[in-house]
Amino acid sequence: MTTTAPPSRRPRRSGVSPSLRRYGAALKSPRGLVGIIVILVLALLSVSAPLLFPDGYDVQSSESLLAPSFTHLFGTDELGRDIFVRSLYGLRTDFSIIVVAVPVSMILGTILGLIGALSRVAGTIVQRVLDIILGFPGLVLGICIVLVVGPGWVSLVIAITISGLPAFGRLARAALMSQMQREYVTAAETLGVSRLTVLGRHILPNAIDPILVQGAVFVVQAIFIEAALSIVGLGIQPPQPSLGALLNVGTRFINQAPTYILGPTVLLLLLALAFSLLADALNETVNRK
Amino acid sequence: MSAKIPQENREVLLDVHDLVVTFDTPAGTIRAVDGVSFELKRGQILGIVGESGSGKSVTSRAVMGMVRSPGVIESGEIALSGNDLRRLNAKQLRRRRGKDLAMIFQDPQAALNPVMRIGAQIEESLLIHGSDKATAKSRSLELLDQVGIPNPTTAAERYPHEFSGGMKQRVVIAIALANSPSLLIADEPTTALDVTIQAQILDLIRTLRDDLGVAILFITHDMGVVAELCDDVVVMYHGRIVEKGPVEQVLRAPRDPYTISLMDAVPRIDAPLRPTPPATPKPVLEVNELRTDVNTNRRGLFRRPEPIFAVNGVSLQVSEGETLGLVGESGCGKSTLSRTIVGINKAASGSITIDGRDVTGRGPRDRRFISNNIQYVFQDPYSSLNPRRTAGQSLEEALVVVGVPASEIRARCEDLMERVGLNADQLDRYPYAFSGGQRQRIGIARALAARPKVLILDEPVSALDVSIQAQILELLKDLQDELGVGYLFISHDLAVVRNISHRVAVMYRGQLVEQGTTAQVFDNPRDEYTRKLLSSTPGLNERFTR
């Protein structure tokens, strides 16, 4: 042997796996760091909302439609409720939707995309179905689901999950197609390793990078789908707040109290921005290799 | 004309002096070319030989003025007929490129634009350097004729995909010659080609030198090609020139230890044969009248295309402890044959028998039996190991499949590593930490995990440098003597096949045209194609026997 690599002293399977370390590196870049800090701060605020404001989001008073001040950071709404409090509770709702819908969509989409490895026919059919979903605008799809399930948290989660499937499915299938050509996949097959094991061991790990990045991108889309459906009144129902629901009501008072929607908008943008920064940073580290 | 001028009196065309090219990497600065000096005269072919990473390609790129970032020409002179090319600015350099110096690339497929007619591609290089349309057209036909393409007028109207690999390389050469450059740089121009085609291209290059008097800088890793073609040779190692001089002198009486080891590593077409394996061979793999249809994938619901038999009636046997070498050029069906035997492709007719059991049908139980008894070693050690899994995990996968209990796996992995000449403590490394040769050893270890009776080795050494190649061949021979495995050794390299095989089969267009002991096939080839193959192989023949 002409070249000898430096001896590795890392004992077997201890420490952090290299792929996890790679994702960790995304947090070291300025963009990733800012993204994750903003997300953590917002998550902390929304989780601690019941502790900070134990009276809840529905405390009404006679001081309606006030502009932002030190007592009411974002002002008050038409029923004299503090918009800052309602925004934090709204953020809570949004996080609860993201935390459920995005991972479910990711996992389901990936599984659907990988079905092609087990049966070519099933793979083709699934892709065509995903194409049909892709052809539906998110809002129209949401309206259809709301018509069936009725407005609320559940239908939002379902709508968001379904609208995410095509992207995840496509990415997983792309990874599958390219990996199936690789010699190490052929090697595993000639060794007699089962299809399912090959899928989990050799193909899935290579599909995960683009899917994770898409996951972060999709969070942003999810927030906007929630907002869009809530703005037209098909999402979260009053009095429960969500960022989208707040905007929905706020736009009605845009003439009397233009500052009504300011706070929720800023929070929504911050959240979306933070996730897209994170997605960007992830994308960069993952593709650098 | 120039062929008549004696070598010494010719004018020096290219003078490279003390060239240093460095690459800034995160791991520090690498001196890829470190103080390289050589001269090239008109009408001369200078070979630069070296293994991968020796700096030979970087040297040629430096001469072209095309060192890519992060590479930087640190110091040195590159003088083309007295003018220092390093002093030219980008525009001046561009004008000289193509006109005074031209390049031939390794892969003709990648060097030609697939959507342009080849005539237009040749004319393009002429038009850029200022000829008018009519002259460009007649000159391009003249060039096509010169590089030996029949019917230039019709050929100019065709697209690259309508040509074979060798013809495409001729077109690439025609483009390089378009503006009558005085210096031609050829970077491994025949590596991607079959031996018979390689022989034709080498002939062409020789004719160009003799008829046009161009100077050629020929970069290669193949000592045989150097021996056949070059006048002078420069041997590079780790960015430095370790030896240079006339080919006769360097190859016959190398002085530098590296050159000596390189020469010893080259498998020779006249080396002694392997001793025959013990008598009463027991056949472990029998293939009978096998045919494989490679056109089944395109079958639709309503259409059943004509079958294309990549393997068309092949019969062969591999016995315990014996190597059957399978030789053939690209597209002859040798890989399809091996893939059919391990069950990646489906047999259309004929039979495959392993250890007396017919496995042609490949039921679920047959599959297990096949993978326990026949294993496959791939050509490219870089793509046959999953980069995300350690060497240990790759071996473990193979062991788990054959039902080795978890408690024994670690010990078996260590044993396998040592058996193929690696250290057991390297098990936890990822593939990137291994060199090409080491990776191929892991590939062999993985194939041996199931203790198979037959190994199918599909060009296992052709992606490796010669010195590594020799080591892997030795390893394979030792393993065979020790374990009694039968090898089906597939290669396009006759010298390698001769080195390791007891018997040889020659494949051409899906059929075996000749089969016999190594001595029979190499010394007394009966088939015409075998003879052609043998005569095309550039070898270190008697002329260079030390």
Image (cartoon, rainbow, N blue to C red):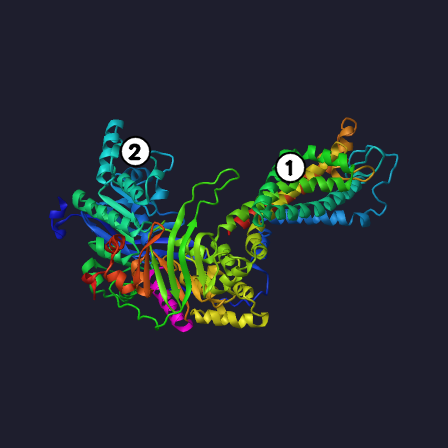
Q: In the image, residue B508 lies at what x, y percent?
A: 32, 51
B100 lies left or right of A279? left
Q: Mark 1 — residue? A: A133
Q: Mark 2 — residue? A: B119
Identify the image quadrant of the N terminus of chain B: top left
B149 lies left or right of B386? left
Residue B220 is tagged as none
A227 lies left or right of B20? right
Identify the amino acid type marked 1: Ile
B276 lies left or right of A5? left
Kindly report the secondary structure that dominates the magenta region of the rendered protein. helix
Q: In the image, residue B528 lies at what x, y percent?
A: 25, 53
Q: Nearer the viewer, residue A37 or B39?
A: B39
Say if residue B216 shows up in the picture. yes
Which residue occupies 27% across, 52% down? B529
Q: In the image, residue A288 lies at what x, y percent?
A: 51, 50
Say if residue B429 shows up in the picture. no
Identify the amino acid type marked 2: Gly
Asked if residue B474 lies in the magenta stretch, the reply is yes
Asked if residue B334 lies in the magenta stretch, the reply is no
Quarter residue A214 falls in: top right
